[in-house]
Image (cartoon, helix red, strand yellow):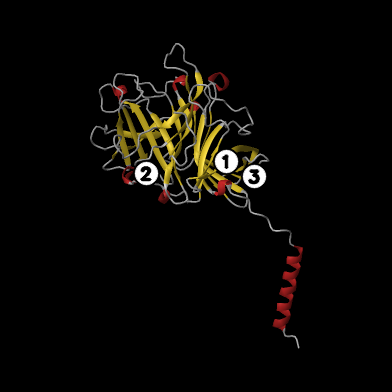
Amino acid sequence: MVTRATGALTAVVALLAVMLGTAGPAQAATPLPGGKSNWVVSVGYMDLATVNNYRNWVRLGYYVFGTDGTVTTNYWTWNQRDQVVRVNTMTADCGGDVPACAVRTVDGFTDDPMGGYQGTFAYTSDGRLAVTWTKTAAGTALSQPSTEYWNVTTGLAGGRAARITSPTFYGAYGNDVAIPASGVFSTYSANFGVGYGSNVPLDRASRATMSQLVGDPRYNAEPYRGAFVVAKASSSDPATQKGIVGREGSGGAWSFGAPPNPWKLCSGSPCMGWLQPNTSCSDTDKDRVRYIAEVGGGRRNTEEYWCQSLAQGQPCYAYNSHPRPMLQVVDDAGEFQGWVGVEAFTHVATRTGLPDGNWVAGYWGIFDMVSQSLQPVLPN
């Protein structure tokens, strides 16, 4: 005798058998780039002024990859033609010879991300990572998808981190950077980029504090260095200046806590400062004022520096400093490994403090500044 319950169970089993028999093959997971899901990435468009008439832009944000082949980004972005300004974040009350001045960043960096995209990723036949943005962060389809083609470097920091770069991001320092032709790095205007990934969350809890960078022996003796690709003036002589794209070094041989170059922690704010001696500042006073501060949530930090001679005897310089929004690079072990960042330098008049349209004097670029275990071979 077949009961009602037995009949129902038989029907369910039969339905499952039909479903399993007609289901297609299982979808294989898409390999994460370098085996890493969470990335901090700097992207930009820098070109000769004769080509783009000072329409350089930079973007800094997060990329998150999934094994289903999807990727999302949230970012902050600035365009030279918008003449974005510097804003105060906190006071660097570090004591000693470090001036007690406001640490400034680029307007908007302390706010929520300015934009975002959704998309997919895959790999080209020559092993590059192809990231294609197809939708806005809200899910609205883009009228024209945009693709980036990244070189991937794996196995950094003992396998705990990976890197992506545009084709000519690294190279010799100087004023003759090879600018990729349209379509080589991206199908839109972006032509330079660098990023680092791991599997650690991108939240505020993952970032190192300024106290750790100065006091933790894992970090405070490390020389953080990298490359800085920048649209700038060809020289300091106004008679011969033109807008070019150069490559400089970022960071240096100095470290945060090891003599002879110790930074000083701010006493009331999450920041640190250093009066760096014997720099390239053009005046007889060669000291450079440097600050790094924790701002906002996530992996955000900001750097600012200026030549002390520009203050002309005043304690602080309120005009044409170098503001650098940055995101921390953190490896799979949760250890700080440096930063990726951007510079969005709008020239302002020292009489008014307002943008003065001196386009050639701008500094618009992207950079990494990372530990020795992540550094590529860099020029001396």
- Tag 3–tag 2 contact (CB < 8 Å): no
Query: Mark 1: which amino acid?
Result: Val
Q: Report x, y in % for residue 191.
A: 57, 31
The tag earlier along the polypeptide, 1 or 2, is 1
Which residue is label 3 attached to?
A: 122
State left or right for residue 123 relative to residue 301.
right
Q: Nearer the viewer, residue 98 or 297?
A: 98
Local SS, label 1: strand
**Label for residue 32?**
none
Query: Mark 3: which amino acid?
Result: Ala
Q: Report x, y in % for residue 276.
A: 31, 30
State left or right for residue 223 relative to residue 172.
left
Q: Is residue 128 above or below residue 175?
A: below
Q: Nearer the viewer, residue 84 or 377?
A: 377
Local SS, label 2: loop
Residue 338 occupies which quadrant of the picture? top left
Q: Whole-Å distance between the Cαs marked 3 and 1?
A: 12 Å
**Label for residue 152?**
1
Q: Whole-Å distance between the Cαs marked 1 and 2?
A: 25 Å
Return the residue found at the far bottom. Answer: 1
The tag earlier along the polypeptide, 3 or 1, is 3
Query: Mark 2: which amino acid?
Result: Tyr
Q: Whole-Å distance between the Cαs marked 3 and 2?
A: 35 Å
Which residue is label 2 attached to?
A: 219
State left or right for residue 238 relative to residue 289.
right
The tag earlier along the polypeptide, 3 or 2, is 3
